[in-house]
Amino acid sequence: MLVSTSTLGGHVDTTLKIATPGRRRRRKHSDEFKADAVAAASQPGVSMAAVALGLGVNANLLRRWVRDAELPLRRPQTSAVAASAAFVPLRVPSSTVAASEIRIEIKRGAVAITVAWPMGAAAECAAWMRELLR
């Protein structure tokens, strides 16, 4: 087992490297280290790749930390969009429904058929559809 240390912003990050023959090493970084790395990468005019290189981490990993740090800021906007796109049931007065039959159009290749059922026989239509779709 190897233990390495690096400093960033006055914080010391002790990463644990577990060396197993034939396998890659996985390092665990503290939340403080990640926060300091994100803060350093977020400075104007600073290259994220240069910060990652200076810290000894992969640039893609640093980008993920930055994206994850920004995610809570984006979440309320996303939920507002999702709430506006949610299903809203709409009641239609029965007097405006002019359909007196159920019309079903089925297309398979070049063949198309249209089936019309009386509205009063909706249960039989549903049973027929179940049989057809088996």
Image (cartoon, rainbow, N blue to C red):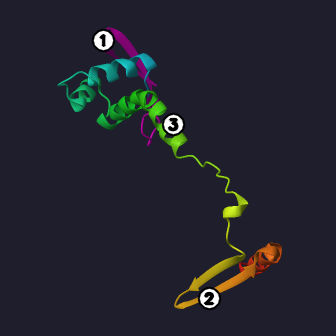
**Horizontal side of residue 59 vs 23, given as left or right:** left
Residue 116 horizontal side relative to residue 120, left or right: left
- Residue at x 68% of width, y 53% of height: 91
Quadrant location of residue 112? bottom right
Q: Quadrant of the C terminus?
A: bottom right
Sequence-first disc among 1 and 2 = 1
Q: Is residue 18 above or below residue 105?
A: above
Identify the secondary structure beneath mark 2.
strand
Tell me where residue 123 appears, x and y as whole percent. Answer: 82, 73
Q: Which residue is mark 2?
A: 113
Secondary element under disc 3, as helix, strand or loop, is: helix
Element marked by disc 1: loop
Mark earlier in primary sequence (3, 1): 1
Write the residue at 57% across / 86% down: 108
What is the span of residues highlighted in magenta in the rendered image? 1-27
Find disc 1 in the rendering and name its residue: 9
Q: Position of residue 62 (x, y in %)?
A: 34, 31
What is the C-alpha distance between the residues marked 3 and 1? 35 Å
Identify the image quadrant of residue 121: bottom right
Judge by depth and name the residue closer to the eye, 123 or 4. 123
- The reply to whether the C-beta atoms of the residues labelled 3 and 1 are less than 8 Å apart is no
Neighbour tally class for label 2: few under 14, some 14-19, many 20 plus, Cα within 10 Å: few
